[in-house]
């Protein structure tokens, strides 16, 4: 009976894990983590830590942890064929840290405060946290299943518990599952993704990362409570650049602790002076210097950085050396280890050499904390950098700064420096980059204090108060970068109908104010919707401002009610330019396929039904165009839009905006955006151009030229056009083009003339730029206490070397206009190139070791050039002379592979890297799921002395349930090489191309018949299509190979238009030039019909009232360039079946015409087509191929044209 009572008492006490401070507990601990794909015969990497743990009590709630017998091992090799190997050097280093005693509080089954010696690293503390987390759980005897939100090593996360009693041993088995994907406060850190907007709709279609953690405890009841007898934990993380349901990289972290013995008493160890190091939650180290792709000895970082910068400058002095571009990452790591005085000393040593100076300024910007701001502050005070150097360095440094409050304050000091204000371009760059810093700061701090953006608000208000348009304009564009909700009130002061007081600002300022709300639309959508609707309804606004209001409104993702309100107002809209833009914009959204527009596309589709009858056939300069696509398997997509905003005051659009977006891993990344605004130029052009018909014939260009003769009437103090560029939604470039820059009457002394005079003297220019474009990192805790990281790095090293000299005849030109009729010759040579490196890393990353899966890609481009040019604009002649190719070079290549990597600081110069697909794959043995394609193809010209070769080598090992992951899992190399041509008697030392033009002809409506005339190969007779009096050529292009004895051989293409204004009578002749010339090819009106290429568009018959298109292509291969076509035809026949199968086509063995290939494309719906391709021996077809655009507008437009014809 006593035993039973004791047992029940123990069960009651078991409600908490306990440690008895009068006892000593000894455990054996082992933790390991592996990274790989989880498939057989694939490479994997990992690490393992083994040790013994001793816990003794100092007081009832304070205990001492001692770690001994530490061993560290790493794994790198093929699954099942490789095992962990010991790393003695690193074992000693880790053991030395863990040998120091640790103190922790243990209260009610939870680990509270942890203390350690000051010199113990945070990485070591985190490993200790992984051990102590086995003593951190909430154990209850009743109920047996319960859920809690509690603090653990992963943060504040939901925990699910299940308990049961083992009746044989009386021990309690506890299962704990931690939902680390939904932690309220997560031990995680993310950098580099502030400008990529989270997209909830994309995440609903799939995940790119899923993590689970499970703990299993065996708890023995004691008088004090529950004693951990053994414990096991398993954490799995699945990551893919795509959707994880299509295969993933896998992390498997597991740890186990087993009780060895419990002893009574024992004197606690003398721990000495310890510091509080926090609680059980994993503390992420500020890991800017721990770049996951680099492991190097960081002793003497300044000397090493200087040496490497000098070496990089030497390597890339003449052209980019692709083998060493990756060394830039090592330099970034070294620079991030330096102190302020180190940077100053480096500047003194490197600034004297232009190459060293440029590399240092470009790379020091990547330090990304207060050290780089202090360095720039000193440079600006001493004025020992040029304005151009300051612009480039400041833009990169400010955009790559860490988003911390103290750095925002330091950046404010930089903005107010006299050096910044002394140059308008530098001042603009400072304003824009400060706005970008504020945006990034607010992305990680919500709510974001208004004090962060206050300098820009002050500048905008000052400009408005003093009627200073430049300050207003730049401040608004910088506020657009900041996207701070607190700036809305200030921005509305510049918008008519919204401001509290009447607004007296120019249209360009109104447009800038509207654009300034573009990023705020996501952060405060309801306020922006109200403002945008008010501006749209304002009739005293410029039309382009109303149109901009529509664009901003849809950035907020408006509700169905707001879209209906907008539709109702559009039904009454009388401005046809505004209506045309709004209707086309709604039409684009209605057919959008991207997840962020899923609901919005439905609302816009309903709006289209109301507006189609009134606005469906409008086609004005003010229009919007959009194409997009999205793939659920890849969780990737893209969109591109082109918007023309204008009004009735000018035939030119007032603004043209081009935007591109990229959708991936649940985020929307804005790529490049370009914008052009016609300022005073639209006043010069006006609402119409006398004599302009719209077919861009010679008379049209003459009409435009007559209008431009009034150039002198434009004001001198206002720009004619302006342009901007944005990257990741952040404006970094803006320029006003002034009248005097393009003025034909501009005299000597202007910047353009200065450049021309320098070119006449001889120009030698070399420029290189390393740039870390993307450094995106996600770090989070694991159950082992080691940080798992997913990182993406993308960098470029660009180099340009140019030597050029020009001559002008006659040399007495005094104005730019005099150059129109001058003979200009130019001699130039040089090389333009860049190398792009891209990495994806998934693994453990600490200052001691790294292990994981790493994808590495490299894409170098090199274009050497040497040419002579002769230009006469008045005579419309351009002649280019290029020497024949003498040395082989690689024009462009791409290589990529996926590796299991291991690095450790004990042996940093010998990293281990095993291809994910093993080397045995190269033997081409017939193993399952292997796929290998390798080829080398060359085409060489003896005439021009040049050839082009294409090489590729692609190796994959795939499983059906792993698509699309296996598409990147393997070795890839592809290259295009330029090689010397085949030597023959016709080989020439250089080639000459001549372009002559009298006027341009619009070819849109031309119906062409291709006719071959062979003078020697065959007997074809046809009446000459040319009139008796030969017309003057419109355009003439000659590509001629010239040898030393002036023998000529090449081709001539000449375009004629015998009837001015009638483009349907245009004709083109292509002929072979030289002693062996034996053919001509004419493109003319249908007069002879033996050989043809035809394109037909018609409406397909359908019971449904819809517009469809049928396009048929046919070509006779036997008699049209039969040698070349036979080669192409044979290659097409070989590759079409495989390519068709790859893209989802079906194949039948239906026989067709022997000498004909035809393709039928039927638009069966507004967003899909049916495709049928008939070849002589088979037919391939696919139905319902999705389109990124709608065919309806094309059909309507062509129907109108046919009716007009």
Image (tube, rainbow, N blue to C red):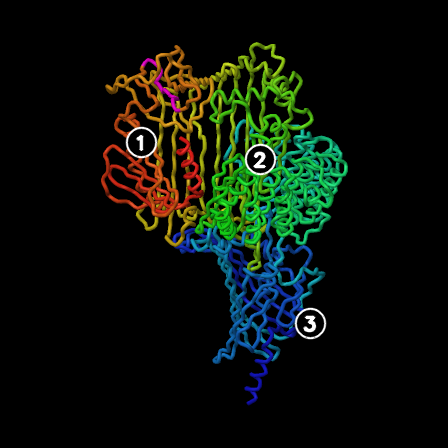
Check contact, mark 2 vs mark 3: CB within 8 A: no
Residue lying farthest to the bottom in this orientation = 1
Task: Give the left or right position of residue 406, taking residue 1060 as reference.
Answer: right
* Mark 1, other Cα within 10 Å: few <14 / some 14–19 / many ≥20: few
Within the magenta stretch, is there residue 638? no
* Picture layout, residue 169 above or below residue 1074: below
The chief SS type of the magenta part is strand
Q: Secondary structure at mark 1?
A: helix
Per the image, label 3 sits on a secondary structure element best described as strand
Q: Which residue is mark 2?
A: 646
Q: Image quadrant for the N terminus?
A: bottom right
Q: CA distance from mark 1 to mark 3?
A: 86 Å
Magenta residues, start to end: 1064-1075
| Residue 247 x/y as whole percent | 43, 53
Q: CA distance from mark 2 to mark 3?
A: 79 Å
* Of pointers 1 and 2, the one earlier in the residue sequence: 2
- Across the whole image, how many numbered discs are drawn on residues? 3
Q: Which residue is mark 1?
A: 1128
Q: Nearer the viewer, mark 1 or mark 3?
A: 1
- Give x and y (percent) for residue 284: 62, 55
Residue 507 appears in which quarter of the rendering? top right
């Amino acid at each position: 009976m006593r035993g039973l009572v004791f047992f029940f008492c123990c069960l009651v006490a078991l409600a908490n894990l306990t440690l008895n401070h009068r006892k000593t507990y000894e455990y054996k601990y082992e933790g390991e983590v592996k990274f790989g794909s989880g498939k057989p015969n694939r490479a994997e990497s990992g690490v393992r830590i083994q040790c013994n743990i001793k816990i003794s009590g100092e007081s009832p709630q304070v205990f001492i942890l001692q770690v001994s017998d530490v061993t560290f091992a790493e794994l790198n090799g093929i699954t099942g064929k490789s095992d962990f190997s010991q790393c003695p050097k690193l074992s000693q280093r880790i053991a030395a840290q863990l040998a120091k005693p640790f103190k922790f509080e243990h209260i009610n089954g939870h680990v509270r405060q942890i203390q350690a010696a000051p010199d113990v690293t945070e990485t070591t503390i985190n490993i200790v946290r992984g051990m102590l987390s086995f003593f951190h759980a909430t154990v209850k005897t009743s109920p047996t299943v319960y859920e809690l939100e509690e603090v653990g090593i992963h943060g504040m996360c939901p925990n699910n518990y299940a308990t049961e009693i083992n009746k044989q041993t009386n021990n309690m088995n506890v299962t704990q599952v931690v939902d680390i994907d939904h932690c309220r406060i997560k031990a995680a850190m993310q950098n580099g993704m502030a400008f990529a907007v989270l997209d909830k709709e994309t995440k609903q279609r799939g995940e790119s990362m899923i993590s689970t953690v499970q703990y299993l405890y065996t708890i023995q009841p004691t008088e004090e409570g529950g004693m951990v007898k053994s414990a096991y934990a398993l954490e799995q993380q699945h990551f893919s650049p795509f959707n994880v349901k299509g295969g993933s990289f896998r992390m498997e972290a597991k740890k186990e602790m087993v009780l060895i013995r419990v002893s009574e008493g024992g004197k606690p160890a003398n721990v000495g002076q310890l510091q509080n190091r926090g609680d059980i939650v994993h503390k992420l180290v500020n890991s800017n210097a721990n770049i996951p792709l680099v492991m190097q000895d960081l002793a003497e970082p300044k000397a090493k950085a200087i040496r490497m910068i000098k070496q990089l400058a030497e390597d890339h002095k003449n052209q980019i050396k692709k083998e060493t571009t990756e060394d830039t990452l090592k330099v970034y790591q070294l620079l991030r280890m330096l102190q302020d005085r180190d940077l100053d000393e480096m500047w003194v040593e490197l600034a004297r050499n232009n190459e060293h100076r440029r590399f240092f300024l470009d790379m020091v910007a990547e330090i990304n904390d207060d050290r780089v701001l202090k360095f720039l502050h000193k440079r600006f005070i001493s004025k020992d950098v040029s304005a151009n150097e300051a612009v480039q360095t400041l833009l990169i440094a400010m955009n790559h700064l860490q988003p911390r409050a103290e750095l925002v304050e330091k950046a404010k000091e930089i903005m107010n420096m006299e050096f910044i204000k002394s140059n308008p371009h530098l001042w603009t760059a400072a304003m824009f980059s400060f706005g970008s810093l504020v945006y990034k700061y607010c992305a990680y701090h919500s709510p974001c204090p208004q004090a962060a953006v206050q300098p820009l608000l002050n500048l905008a208000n000052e400009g408005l108060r003093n009627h200073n348009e430049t300050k207003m304009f730049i401040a608004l564009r910088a506020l657009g970068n900041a996207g701070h909700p607190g700036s809305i009130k200030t921005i509305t002061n510049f918008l008519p109908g919204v401001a509290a007081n009447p607004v007296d600002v120019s249209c360009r300022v109104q447009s800038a104010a509207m654009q300034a709300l573009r990023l705020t639309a996501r952060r405060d959508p309801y306020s922006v919707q109200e403002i945008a609707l008010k501006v749209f309804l304002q009739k005293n606004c410029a039309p382009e401002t109303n149109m901009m209001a529509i664009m901003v409104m849809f950035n907020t993702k408006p509700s169905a009610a707001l879209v209906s309100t907008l539709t109702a107002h559009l039904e009454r809209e009388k401005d046809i330019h505004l209506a045309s833009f709004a209707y086309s914009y709604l039409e684009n959204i209605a057919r959008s396929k991207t997840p962020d527009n899923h609901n919005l596309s439905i609302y816009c589709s309903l709006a289209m039904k109301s507006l189609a009858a009134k606005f469906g056939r409008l086609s004005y300069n003010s229009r919007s165009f959009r194409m997009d696509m999205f793939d659920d398997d890849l969780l990737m997509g893209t969109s591109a839009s082109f918007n023309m905003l204008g009004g009735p005051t000018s035939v030119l659009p007032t603004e043209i905006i081009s935007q591109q977006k990229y959708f991936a891993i649940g985020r929307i990344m804005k790529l490049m955006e370009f914008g052009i605004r016609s300022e005073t130029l639209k006043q010069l052009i006006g609402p119409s151009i006398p004599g302009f018909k719209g077919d861009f014939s010679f008379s049209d260009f003459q009409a435009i030229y007559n209008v431009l003769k009034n150039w002198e009437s434009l004001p001198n103090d206002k720009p004619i056009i302006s342009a901007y560029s944005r990257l990741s939604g952040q404006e970094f470039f803006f320029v006003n083009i002034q009248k005097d820059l393009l003025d034909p009457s501009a005299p000597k002394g202007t910047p353009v003339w200065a450049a021309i005079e320098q070119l006449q003297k001889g120009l030698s220019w070399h420029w290189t730029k390393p740039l870390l474009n993307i450094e995106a990192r996600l770090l989070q805790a694991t159950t082992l206490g080691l940080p798992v990281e997913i990182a993406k790095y993308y960098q470029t090293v660009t180099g340009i070397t140019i030597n050029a000299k020009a001559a002008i005849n006659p040399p007495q030109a005094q104005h730019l206009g005099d150059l129109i009729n001058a003979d200009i010759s130019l001699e130039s040579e040089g090389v333009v190139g860049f190398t792009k490196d891209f990495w994806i890393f998934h693994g453990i990353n600490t200052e001691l070791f790294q292990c994981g899966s790493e994808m590495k890609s490299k894409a170098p481009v090199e274009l050497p050039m040497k040419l002579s040019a002769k230009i006469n604009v008045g005579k419309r002649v351009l002649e280019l002379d290029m020497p024949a190719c003498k040395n082989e070079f690689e024009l462009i290549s791409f290589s990529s592979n996926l590796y299991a990597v291991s690095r450790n600081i004990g042996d940093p110069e010998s990293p281990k890297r095993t291809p994910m697909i093993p080397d045995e794959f190269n033997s081409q043995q017939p193993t399952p799921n292997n796929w290998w394609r390798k080829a080398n193809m060359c085409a060489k010209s003896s005439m021009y002395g040049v050839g082009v070769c294409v090489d590729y080598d692609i190796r994959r090992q795939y499983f059906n349930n792993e698509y699309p992951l296996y598409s990147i899992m393997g070795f890839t190399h592809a290259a295009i090489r330029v090689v010397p041509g085949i030597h023959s008697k016709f080989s020439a030392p250089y080639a000459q191309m001549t372009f002559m033009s009298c006027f341009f002809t619009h070819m849109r409506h031309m119906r062409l018949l291709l006719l071959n005339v062979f003078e020697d190969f065959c007997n074809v007779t046809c009446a000459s299509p040319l009139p008796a009096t030969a017309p003057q050529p419109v355009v003439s292009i000659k590509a001629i190979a010239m040898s030393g004895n002036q023998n000529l051989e090449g081709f001539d293409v000449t375009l004629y238009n015998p009837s001015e204004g009638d483009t349907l009578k245009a004709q083109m002749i292509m002929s072979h030039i030289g002693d062996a010339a034996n053919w001509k090819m004419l493109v003319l009106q249908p007069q002879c019909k033996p050989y043809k290429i035809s394109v037909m568009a018609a409406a397909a018959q359908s019971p449904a009232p819809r517009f469809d298109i049928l396009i048929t292509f046919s070509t006779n291969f036997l008699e049209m360039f039969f040698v070349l076509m036979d080669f192409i035809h044979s290659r097409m026949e070989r590759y079409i079946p495989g390519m068709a199968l790859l893209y989802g086509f079906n194949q039948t063995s239906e026989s067709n015409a022997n000498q004909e290939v035809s393709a039928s494309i039927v638009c069966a719906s507004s967003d899909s087509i049916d495709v049928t391709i008939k070849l002589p021996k088979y037919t391939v077809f696919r139905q319902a191929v999705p389109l990124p655009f709608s065919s309806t507008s094309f059909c309507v437009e062509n129907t109108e044209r046919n009716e007009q014809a």
